[in-house]
Image: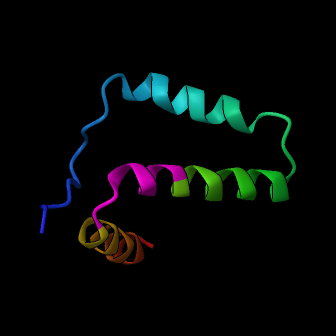
Amino acid sequence: MTELTLTPNIDSADDFYADLLAAHEGLSKAESDAFNARLILVLANHIGDRSVLSAAIEAARRKG
């Protein structure tokens, strides 16, 4: 299994966050939730490794 990266690892993280917020502008709560779901599926497909995705799900549960 590939180790899940949980430390900051995004180039220009502030710019990414600004882009993410901008993508939600003008969306209703339902549209924003649907956008987040689509983004998660796109990124999960890019990752592709089922063990990494399972580890990410578990890490997200622990953070909540």
Numbered label tally? 0
Instruction: Classify residue 53 as left or right of residue 2.
Output: right
Q: Residue at x 13, y 61 (%)?
A: 3
* Nearer-the-camera pick, 44 or 58: 44
Majority secondary structure of magenta residues: helix
Query: Is 15 on the left or on the right of 37, as rendered?
Result: left
What percent of the width, then of the height, locates residue 45?
44, 55
Say which quadrant the C terminus sits in.
bottom left
Residues drawn in magenta: 42-49
Q: Nearer the viewer, residue 34 or 47?
A: 47
Query: Within the magenta stretch, is there residue 13?
Result: no
Residue 53 in the image, given as x and y percentages of width and height: 34, 67
Q: Quadrant of residue 33?
A: bottom right
On screen, residue 12 above or below 45: above
Q: Is residue 46 above or below residue 23?
A: below
Q: For this view, does 42 lie left or right of residue 34?
A: left
Locate residue 6: give its quadrant.
Answer: bottom left
- At which x and y percent is residue 25? 78, 34
Asked if 46 appears above or below 63 in the picture, the reply is above
Write the residue at 33% across / 77% down. 58
In the rendered view of the protein, which quadrant contains the N terminus?
Answer: bottom left
Question: Left or right: 52 with respect to 33?
Answer: left
Write the residue at 73% across / 39% down.
Answer: 24
What percent of the width, then of the height, locates residue 63? 38, 70
Q: Residue at x 63, y 54 (%)?
A: 38
- Give the colouring mode of the picture: rainbow
